[in-house]
Image (tube, rainbow, N blue to C red):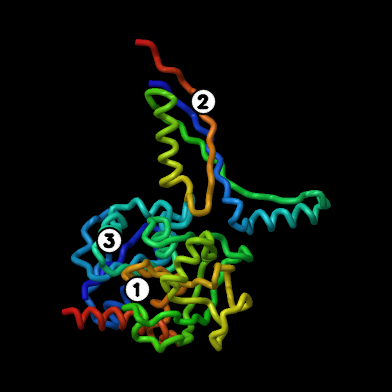
Amino acid sequence: MPTYQAQIYVTLRPSVLDTAGTAVQSGLHHMGFDAVEQVRIGKYIQVTLMADDEATARQQLDQMCDQLLTNPVIENYRFDLAVKTPAIAP
Amino acid sequence: MNISIIVFPGANCDRDAAYVTRDLLGQPTHLVWHEESDLQNADLVIVPGGFSYGDYLRCGAIARFSPALQATIDHAQRGGWVLGICNGFQILTEAGLLPGALVRNRDLHFVCDRQPLRVERTNLIWTQAYADRAVITLPIAHGEGCYYADAETLQSLEEHQQIVFRYSSADGEITEAANPNGSLHNIAGICNRQGNVLGMMPHPERAADSILGQTDGLALFKGVLTQSLQAA
């Protein structure tokens, strides 16, 4: 069974005020980066998993994201998926 | 009335809640470890405050999958009483027993204060011992207590009178200045449509014994007890 590595990006929904992002933005302004218009802070999660094929891996990752890794009320996600170790030929 | 209080690793208000129900009100109270799924025939399940599972990932996110919380969801769906306080409120929203979510406070600060609240509804077991539109003072202590829900959910909460407590000024005015964390509509506590599940950020269990100076929270527990005695 091949091993896949997913890189999951979790971001706050645009309608949710990102207080931490706003604070960091103000820090960047204090540094002199006046051109910074917006900062949004999210999370980056790496998951390594075994699955029969890519479609199965994607389906399982969607479930993980919907049920635990993100809260759909306040967050969106997307992920990149790559084969880490191919299946070993019998 | 049988009371069960769920104990998560990182919970720190479980014993405070047990002190109120067992020592002040004399009710049989069980502390139920998060890995147990037997709620000991509870009438009321309390999901206490604290930092369950270190608040890793998101507040309340991991607690939701514990056996004790799965049993609590079943209990709520059978119409049983469930009270979530602070982290317990966060857990109940993560579990989908209550709508919306609790996010970082508006000013990013952990707020620890005594906060006036207006009781918005008194035809619930939780609030029947309070006067209509009473202003009570309860302690708050949280970093992620800013209530968020989309516009449609907020409208539905208002229409179905699910907002039970709002942050207010000492004289009961609902203003932005009286809002300690940026919660939409000054929401401090909500119930589900049926009214058997209540989640709130303020701590009624920390304002129940006169030795601590404030007792405005005791009436909430007494209200549930009264209802339970009437039903028996």
Left or right: B59, with B44 as reference point: right
**What amino acid is labelled 3 in the image?**
Gln
Q: What is the x, y in percent for residue A78?
A: 54, 38
**Which of the 4 image quarters holds residue B17?**
bottom left
Residue depicted at 40% across the width and 89% down the height: B131
**Circle 1 residues within 10 Å: few <14, some 14–19, many ≥20:** many
* Residue A90 at least partly seen: yes
Residue picked out by circle 1:
B17
Residue picked out by circle 3:
B77
Q: What is the x, y in percent for residue B172?
A: 54, 85
Number of marks in the rendered image: 3
Q: What is the x, y in percent for residue B154?
A: 50, 65
Observer-side mark, 3 or 1, equals: 3
**What amino acid is labelled 1 in the image?**
Ala
Q: Quadrant of the C terminus of chain B?
A: bottom left
Distance between mark 1 and mark 2 Cα atoms? 48 Å
Q: Secondary structure at mark 1?
A: helix
Distance between mark 2 and mark 3 Cα atoms? 41 Å
**Circle 3 residues within 10 Å: few <14, some 14–19, many ≥20:** some
Q: Are marks 2 and 3 on the same chain?
A: no
Q: Are marks 1 and 2 on the same chain?
A: no
- Nearest the camera: B30 or A44? A44
Q: Where is B111 relative to B221, above or below?
A: above
**Circle 2 residues within 10 Å: few <14, some 14–19, many ≥20:** few
Residue depicted at 27% across the width and 66% down the height: B31
- Nearest the camera: B198 or A31? B198
Residue picked out by circle 2:
A82
What's the chain of the residue with tag 1? Answer: B
